[in-house]
């Protein structure tokens, strides 16, 4: 699968079949996350793989009752440790680690799709509850829960605004109309 196919056809999956995900696939997903860009190449993202049903149920509860999360084969929790980033970049460190976590998460979602798996980016949860459930030290920040498994659904593509409505040339407001002809995915 090429990168554009992965980008255009990946969907957020919230229903999974009862089939474990192979360790090799989990390792490839984490490797994709590891290769995401990071500020100053500090590589501050860390991950917890959760496959224990009891912990997945607790994470579902911490995610404000999103119990579908517990049906995934695994949940990967995305963390950052920003002490080095803070020393180098000061007040902007919190923003930078969020950007880095987001890049790692997107790589994970695309890799999961390319491997025939389904995944979803869950960012609504009680961080303190997740920290307690997984014994996460206070110097780490929790950014996302990524439930991963074999999909039991194939959602339709969501609506996307056309390139001509979101792109400008040289300054804001000067629409680059020529881009309309360059779209490569059906609107």
Image (tube, rainbow, N blue to C red):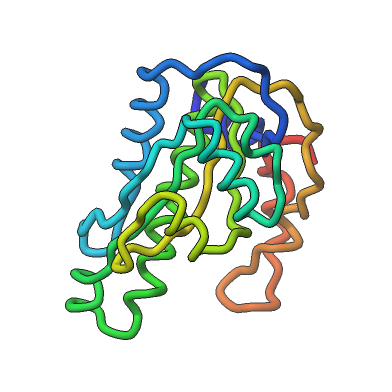
Where is residue 177, by image quadrant?
bottom right
Image position of 113 (left or right of 143) = right
Image position of 145 (left or right of 33) = right
Image position of 153 (left or right of 76) = right
Q: Is residue 86 above or below residue 82?
A: below
Number of numbered discs on residues:
0
Q: Is residue 117 above or below residue 39?
A: above
Q: Residue at x 36, y 35 (%)?
A: 30
Q: Is residue 129 above or below residue 68?
A: below
Q: Residue at x 54, y 31 (%)?
A: 53
Where is residue 165, by image quadrant?
bottom right
**As rendered, which of 149 and 92 lies closer to the eye?**
149
Measured from the top left, where is residue 85 in percent x and y?
A: 24, 71
Measured from the top left, where is residue 24 in percent x and y?
A: 36, 18
Measured from the top left, where is residue 82 in percent x and y?
A: 28, 68
Q: Residue at x 61, y 28 (%)?
A: 118
Residue at the far bottom in the pictured view: 91
Q: Residue at x 51, y 40 (%)?
A: 55
Quarter of the rendering occupied by the C terminus: top right
Measured from the top left, where is residue 74 in percent x and y?
A: 50, 31
Residue at the far front in the pictured view: 54
């Amino acid at each position: 699968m090429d990168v554009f196919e992965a980008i255009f056809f990946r969907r957020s999956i919230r229903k999974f079949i009862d089939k474990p995900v192979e360790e090799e696939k989990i390792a490839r997903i984490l490797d994709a996350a590891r290769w995401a860009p990071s500020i100053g190449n500090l590589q501050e993202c860390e991950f917890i793989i959760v496959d224990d049903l009891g912990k997945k149920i607790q994470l579902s509860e911490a995610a404000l009752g999103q119990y579908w999360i517990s049906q995934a084969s695994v949940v990967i929790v995305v963390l950052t440790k920003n002490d080095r980033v803070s020393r180098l970049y000061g007040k902007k460190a919190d923003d930078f680690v969020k950007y880095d976590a987001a890049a790692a998460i997107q790589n994970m979602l695309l890799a999961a799709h390319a491997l025939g798996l389904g995944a979803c980016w869950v960012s609504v949860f009680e961080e303190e509850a997740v920290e307690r459930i997984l014994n996460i030290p206070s110097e780490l920040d929790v950014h996302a829960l990524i439930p991963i498994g074999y999909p039991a659904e194939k959602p339709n593509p969501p609506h996307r605004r056309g390139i001509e409505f979101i792109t400008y040339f040289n300054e804001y407001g000067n629409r680059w109309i020529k881009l309309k002809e360059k779209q490569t995915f059906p609107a």
